Image (tube, rainbow, N blue to C red):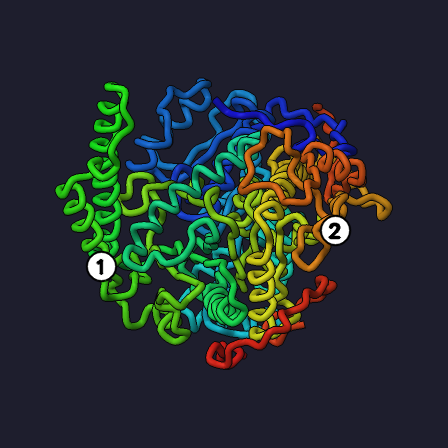
């Protein structure tokens, strides 16, 4: 049964409703994408999570069109008979003659066709070439050429206006795909992208300025829970701890209660996703924790699919040893309990010297001997096909993070997506994220960034960048993102080495937080969920569809955009209390209420300061200003600073780097040019 969130955690006062009703009678929406019921990347998440709000708006007049795959049909599609005679005739015609007809309705409807990415764009181009009466929208979630250029280690954002796009696409053997993408962008009545940073990119690479930015949202109800999400964090963390116990058997010389779990996940694009910066920052963090005598240990997970042939034998052995120890402990516990029970039955206290016999000690000694290990715990959980050239493993060898006992930072590379049926780490992605303390996504090229967004709605702090759509969106809507657990790394106006130092500062400061401070920060992070809810972000898609109808059918539909009011702004204020920072007074930040039922991630502080999450949320809500929808449309119908990346926007607020010296052996190397 889904848990509901309290009003104090979710409501956004002042968020205006759109009073303009748009007559959708005799209007049909088709949404076309390669990832309809076909999970490949982030577009699948966009379509899946947006389906409900779009279906509520369009009802039975909303259709998704995608490739037919047996796996997708078996697991995600419910086969039904066509709901209308017109649709049945259309499908019959398509089955017999191909995709030649769409016009099978007695009343000619107004059709809106929304195409996602270049793979579906060919349909848009044909619609316009054949002059079909269809209002078309094209959304690029990431430009094809931009992704290739960034993967090629070029100074992308400083040279956007200088690229010879035809030459660059031809040299990378993607010219035909690039032309399809560019043609779709120019043929569409309305062209959209998912973020402002991608809009600038599209303007230079595809040679058309997007008409509207449509940020990606999530179905927040799927993740929402009142105070229970703190319980879910503790439960999921316990599952991760069980894996860690097995993985580090024989070297479990660190305190799991003082261990933090960081992770990075996504497509295996080593530089684009920022894995290079993350690894270097981990090396520097390891140095800082060691020289300062910190008791904290960090376990950093890399969840990025790569080419493997099987699980690592040593990794599987670790989980087997852990299970054997657990079984041995249970066996001894049962025998001990039985003898204790029998002694109490006869009314005498047990003789502790007789509670365990030689067989029990022999069994325990064998279990202990089984935990002896001569080698370090493995860095990679699988056997890699290209171990010697893999960029993550190569970097780990260079920086020397081999999971030794002296290291305060441990690294685990899991080169496949998580699954609850895995014999190694049997958790799904959502449960894994909930159990971690911090998601780290220092991407150089990230048009949106669903991974930090998913962290946010689950109440997990994250690191993003001002070159990602998510990071820019949060900077625009939050006065002090880091106070809410959203750390924005500057990769736009800083060099690569400076960005790495800034990330090291974020990680080291996070390690210095107390458990109470992490609880408060998770509450604040979860309170940002509404910013990412399709209930609000879906309005941008509504504007795009209204704009397309007005352009395609000007006699029936009109589009009247409203000018943005500079006095308004949808912007979360600085929290009512001072952000949880170890450099500030302990009395500046509130404590967990002692009589509150919300679970804690540790005992309250000794000074007895009280903390009420609902009260703090109410204070924050009173400071929230009225929202601004700069691209809002009022529609009526007659029928109803870096060498590697700077763009022309204002820089984000700077964050100081740690004053401690960084390890000279952790140099990131030459900056990319």
Q: How many marks?
A: 2
Residue positioned 32% across, 42% down in the render: 426
Image spot of residue 612 (x, y percent): 69, 34
Seen from the viewer's position, the closer of residues 391 and 404 is 404
Q: Which residue is the site of mark 2? A: 479
Q: Is residue 201 visible?
A: no
Image spot of residue 278 (x, y percent): 49, 64
Residue positioned 57% across, 44% down in the render: 456
Q: Name the N-terminal-most of marks 2 and 1.
A: 1
Image spot of residue 75 (x, y percent): 33, 32
Q: Is mark 2 on a helix, strand or loop?
A: loop
Residue at mark 2 to residue at mark 1: CA–CA distance = 52 Å
Quadrant placement of the C terminus: bottom right
Quarter of the rendering containing residue 564: top right
Quarter of the rendering containing residue 204: bottom right
Residue positioned 49% across, 76% down in the render: 668
Q: Which residue is the site of mark 1? A: 372
Image spot of residue 34 (x, y percent): 42, 44
Mark 2 vs mark 1: give the one in front.
1
Instruction: Tell me: residue 634, above or below residue 417.
Output: above
């Amino acid at each position: 049964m889904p848990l509901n969130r309290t009003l104090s955690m979710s409501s956004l006062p002042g968020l205006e409703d759109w009073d303009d009703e748009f007559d959708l009678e005799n209007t049909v929406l088709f949404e076309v994408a390669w990832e309809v019921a076909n999970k490949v990347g982030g577009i699948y998440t966009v379509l899946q999570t947006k389906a409900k709000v779009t279906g509520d708006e369009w009802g039975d007049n909303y259709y998704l069109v995608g490739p037919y795959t047996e796996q997708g049909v078996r697991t995600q599609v419910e086969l039904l008979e066509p709901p209308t005679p017109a649709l049945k005739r259309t499908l019959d015609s398509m089955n017999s003659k191909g995709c030649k007809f769409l016009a099978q309705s007695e009343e000619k409807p107004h059709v809106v066709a929304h195409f996602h990415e270049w793979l579906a764009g060919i349909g848009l181009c044909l619609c316009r070439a054949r002059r079909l009466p269809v209002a078309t929208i094209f959304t690029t979630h990431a430009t094809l050429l931009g992704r290739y250029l960034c993967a090629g280690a070029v100074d992308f954002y400083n040279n956007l206006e200088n690229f010879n796009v035809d030459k660059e696409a031809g040299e990378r053997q993607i010219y035909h795909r690039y032309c399809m993408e560019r043609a779709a962008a120019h043929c569409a009545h309305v062209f959209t992208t998912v973020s402002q940073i991608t809009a600038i990119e599209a303007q230079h690479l595809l040679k058309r300025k997007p008409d509207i930015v449509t940020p990606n949202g999530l179905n927040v109800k799927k993740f929402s829970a009142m105070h229970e999400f703190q319980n879910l964090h503790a439960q999921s963390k316990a599952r991760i701890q069980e894996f860690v116990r097995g993985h580090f058997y024989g070297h479990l010389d660190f305190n799991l209660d003082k261990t933090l779990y960081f992770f990075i996940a996504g497509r295996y694009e080593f530089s684009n996703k920022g894995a290079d910066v993350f690894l270097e920052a981990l090396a520097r963090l390891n140095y800082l924790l060691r020289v300062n005598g910190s008791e904290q240990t960090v376990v950093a997970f890399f969840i990025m699919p790569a080419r493997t042939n099987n699980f690592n034998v040593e990794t599987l052995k670790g989980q087997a040893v852990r299970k054997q120890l657990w079984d041995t402990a249970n066996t001894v516990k049962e025998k001990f309990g039985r003898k204790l029970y029998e002694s109490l039955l006869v009314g005498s206290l047990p003789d502790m010297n007789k509670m365990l016999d030689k067989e029990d000690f022999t069994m325990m000694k064998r279990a202990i001997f089984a935990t002896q290990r001569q080698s370090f715990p493995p860095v990679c959980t699988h056997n890699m096909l290209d171990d010697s050239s893999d960029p993550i493993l190569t970097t780990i060898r260079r920086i020397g993070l081999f999971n030794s006992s002296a290291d305060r930072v441990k690294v685990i590379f899991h080169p496949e997506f998580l699954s609850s049926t895995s014999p190694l780490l049997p958790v799904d992605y959502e449960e894994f994220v909930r159990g971690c303390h911090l998601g780290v996504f220092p991407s150089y090229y990230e048009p949106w960034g669903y991974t930090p967004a998913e962290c946010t709605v689950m109440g997990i702090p994250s690191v993003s960048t001002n070159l990602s759509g998510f990071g820019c969106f949060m900077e625009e809507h939050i006065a002090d993102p880091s106070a809410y657990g959203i750390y924005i790394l500057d990769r736009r106006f800083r060099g690569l080495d400076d960005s790495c130092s800034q990330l090291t500062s974020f990680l080291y400061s996070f390690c210095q937080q107390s458990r109470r401070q992490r609880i408060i920060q998770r509450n604040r992070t979860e309170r940002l969920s509404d910013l990412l809810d399709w209930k609000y972000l879906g309005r941008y898609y509504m504007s795009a569809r209204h704009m397309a109808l007005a352009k395609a059918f000007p006699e029936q539909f009109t589009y009247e955009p409203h000018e943005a009011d500079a006095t308004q702004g949808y912007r979360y204020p600085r929290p009512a209390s001072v952000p949880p920072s170890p450099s500030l007074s302990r009395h500046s930040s509130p404590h967990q209420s002692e009589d509150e039922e919300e679970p804690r991630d540790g005992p309250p502080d000794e000074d007895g300061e009280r903390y009420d999450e609902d009260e703090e949320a109410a204070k924050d809500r009173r400071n929230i200003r009225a929202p601004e929808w700069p691209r809002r449309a009022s529609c009526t119908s007659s029928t109803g600073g870096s060498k590697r990346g700077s763009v022309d926007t204002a820089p984000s607020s700077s964050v100081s780097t740690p004053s401690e010296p960084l390890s000279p052996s952790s140099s990131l190397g030459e900056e990319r040019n």
